Image: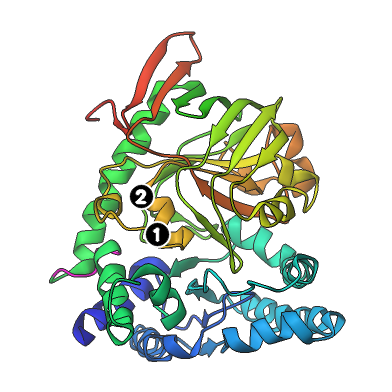
Amino acid sequence: MIEQMRKYAELVVRVGVNLQPGQPLVIGFGSRQVYPDQVPFARLLAQAAYDAGASYVHIDWGDEWWLRETVKRADLAILRQCAQWQVEWVERLAEMGAAYVAMPASDPALFAGIPRDRVEQAERAVREAFRLFDNQRTSDRYRWTLASAPTQAWADAVHPELPREDRLEALWRDILQASRATGEDPIADWEQHIANLKRRAAWLNDLKIHALHYRAPGTDLTIELAEGHYFEAAGHPDVKGFRFVANIPTEEVFTAPKKTGVNGTVASTMPLNHGGSLIEGIRLRFENGRIVEYSAEKGEEALKAIIEADEGSHYLGEVALVPVDSPIAQMNRIFYNTLFDENASCHLAIGRAYPLIEGGHELAHEDWEAHGLNDSLMHVDFMIGSADLDIDAVLQDGRTVPIFRKGRWASEA
């Protein structure tokens, strides 16, 4: 397995962030630090980066035990100060042209038993500190990718059927398979995969879609798309023209909804692990874009914290299409990790948009709303795909075209 892990590290460096000679690399930032179980892979990433000509590799080490105890017992005002100091260093590296890798792998029960208000304070401290950096990152000012490595706590959640000593290795196998990193040449495999996703995005763009209509048990939702929108997929350029892949794995094509153009109801189909809290059975109702009712069968307080974070977290920021026969969906496994679960299912994101409209990456944030784009501290994906999901596109000329039938693409385009 170690040889496949090396190939995976090379994939992350050369395709994920497309690191250039002389460029610094940051591994771990914000709330996504590198945990002890991830140290071996972080070292492989650093080695692959230096092999690619990196000028400097910075690893931001962390520990979930420490994080839980800090959220539970610390003076959170000091945590806020530390987050501000941390982002200063991250931004200095950004000024030097750094690329960024994060390895999301949080324990789904990390904050169980801790008062929700303390969890919210801690999360907000980090988000607010990193808001400007994240705005720049998601506007493609820097190249970045999310590509995970397992931790024991996460593996315990995904593989409870196995003896504990076998769970970490089993999750490693899952990650490598999901990330298309098990072949002889994962980089070549990814070039073909990117081309396939780009072809699908081009088909959607050629349709000139005005709105998408979703129908499934618990879901009857219409989403207008932002004017001038376009569908994107893996392998888009940063502002300097260098291609990168923001998520490894990725099976989605995605775009920006019109902030005020969402109406109806939607029900989630998979659990959402958000910041160490598990949320299940999400139901939302929208009027003119805004979430006006919400509930969850489990973790409703955590859902409330997401939606009530700010005004923008009452609106959607992303629409993403993923068929139920995607390779990750076919693994028939819940990962309790959005990086993987969102690539097994159609999903929506509460909060900040990606500026996927013509000229969107040049727009100042204060001009987003005038162009139908939503801004927020939050960007939280939740899964709504199933084998019962149908999606129709209402085109700009008024025609209706089937996009999904029974959770799968309705066209072979």
- Most foreground residue, 343 or 277: 277
Q: Which residues are magenta?
A: 179-183
| Total residue callouts | 2
Pinpoint residue 410: horizontal percent, then vertical percent.
Answer: 28, 26
Q: Which residue is found at the position 75% from the left and 73% from the top?
A: 122
The residue type indicated by label 2 comes to Ala
- How many neighbours does mark 1 have within 10 angstroms: few (below 14), some (14-19), or many (20 or more)? many
Q: Give me the disc on residue 328.
A: none
Vertical position of residue 139 compared to residue 368: above or below: below
Pinpoint residue 372: horizontal percent, then vertical percent.
Answer: 69, 33
Q: Which residue is found at the position 60% from the left and 87% from the top?
A: 65
Vertical position of residue 411 compared to residue 49: above or below: above
- How many neighbours does mark 2 have within 10 angstroms: few (below 14), some (14-19), or many (20 or more)? many
Q: In the structure shown, which secondary structural element does the residue marked by tag 2 occupy? A: helix
User: Where does label 2 land, which residue?
Assistant: 344
Q: In the structure shown, which secondary structural element does the residue marked by tag 1 occupy? A: helix
User: Where does label 1 land, which residue?
Assistant: 340
* Cβ atoms under marks 1 and 2 closer than 8 Å: yes
Residue 260 visible, this orientation: no
Residue 133 horizontal side relative to residue 74, left or right: left
Q: Which residue is found at the position 47% from the left and 16% from the top?
A: 394
Pinpoint residue 207: horizontal percent, then vertical percent.
Answer: 40, 22
Pinpoint residue 247: horizontal percent, then vertical percent.
Answer: 43, 60
